[in-house]
Every structure is written in C-alpha cells, then in structure tokens.
Image: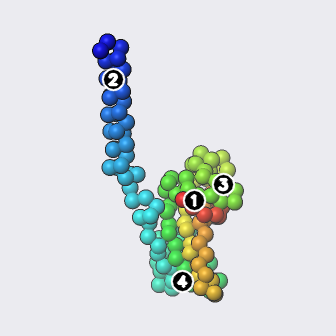
Amino acid sequence: MNKAIKYLVFFLIFDAVVIGAYFGYRALRGGGGPGLAGVPWVTVDEDFEPRNEVEAFIKADAENRGALPVQIRNFGSDKKALKRFKGRELARPTENILNLFFKGLADWMIVEIKIKTGGEIEAVRTVLYVLQNTQWKVGDSGSLLD
C-alpha cells in the first residue's frame, strides 16, 4: 500500500471514531435534563397554592370564568420550550428575539393550559407570558411544536 492510501485509511478511521464518540456522548447525555415531557401537569382548583404571579392569575381567571379545575404545565424560562413554541406572532423565537419584540423585558415564562369545555372536549393552549416593566402580561399564545 502506498503512503497516501495509508493516510487516507487512517483519516477515515479517525473520523469514524470521532463521529461515533460524539453521537455516543449525545445519546448518554439524553438532551441535558428531563426535557419537556418531564414537566408534570398540575391541577388548578380551589385548593391550589400558586407558586408565582402567573399561576395566581391563571387560577383567578379560571375562577372568574367558572372553568375550575384546569390543568397547567409551567415550563418557566425553559429555552427548549421556547424553541418549540409557535404562537400567532412568534414562531420558535430565541431570547434575543423576545428582547427585540418586548421592550423592557425582564423575564418570560411558558405555560401550557388544559381546559375541559362543557362537552368534555379538552382545549390545550400554550401561553408565553412576559415580565415587562415589572408587570406580567400575555406576550403570545399558540402551541408547542413536536
């Protein structure tokens, strides 16, 4: 075998080992945490104790509409959830896009809300809440993409 072919074979074997190690590491790491499926649904009823202002708003709004109990999944400021969010105004935004879209943005949160209607039909809506100038408000609503 001449010298050029030996180097080519060595290079191909080295590349295969590096690529295999990379994908093996990603498989073992498992995406870096529990992922979106690891966030549990929580039932919001009369006895529910909200953990933050957004959950308190959701509970109060559901009480006013007579829609209790509802279920929520609070993803908080999870970048994976933000990457999967598709709303009316924003599709798969990044934190930089949120900062450009909402002036004075201090924080953001994604919450999935499941409501059973009168006909026992479940409606699931994903809402992007933004903390803008010390007040939480709805930034956009839509769904999480698969």
Tell me which corner region of the image, top left, top right, bottom left or bottom right, holds residue 6.
Answer: top left
Per the image, label 4 sits on a secondary structure element best described as: loop
- Identify the residue shown where x is 56% and y is 84%: 68
Query: Label 3 amino acid?
Result: Leu
Does the residue at mark 1 contact the one at mark 3 (Cβ under 8 Å)? no
Q: Earlier in the sequence, mark 3 or mark 4?
A: 4
Secondary structure under the numbered disc 2 in the rendered image:
helix
**Going 44% across and 64% down the picture, which residue do you hit?**
37
Could you tell me which residue is drawn at 63 percent across and 87 percent down? 119
Rate crowding at label 2 as few (under 14), some (14 to 19) or many (20 or more) other CA atoms within 10 Å.
few
Residue 60 visible in image: no
Between discs 1 and 2, the one toward the N terminus: 2
**Quarter of the picture holding the C terminus:** bottom right
Mark 3–mark 4 Cα distance, whole angstroms, equals 29 Å
Disc 1 and disc 4 in contact, CB within 8 angstroms: no
Q: Amino acid at mark 4?
A: Pro
Read off the residue under disc 4.
Answer: 69
Give the residue pinned by disc 3.
90
Q: Nearer the viewer, residue 73 or 121?
A: 121
**The residue tagged with tag 1: helix, strand or loop?**
loop
State if disc 4 and disc 3 touch (CB < 8 Å): no
Please name the amino acid that badge 2 sits on: Val
Among the two numbered marks 1 and 4 on one chain, the one whose residue lies closer to the N terminus: 4
Q: Nearer the viewer, mark 2 or mark 4?
A: 2
Q: Label 3, secondary structure: give it.
A: loop
Apparent side of residue 80 relative to residue 17 in the rendered image (left or right): right
In three-dimensional space, the C-alpha distance between marks 3 and 2, rounded to whole angstroms, equals 48 Å
Quarter containing the N terminus: top left
- Judging depth in this view, the residue of 7 and 82 nearest the camera is 7
Residue bearing mark 2: 9
Q: Earlier in the sequence, mark 2 or mark 4?
A: 2
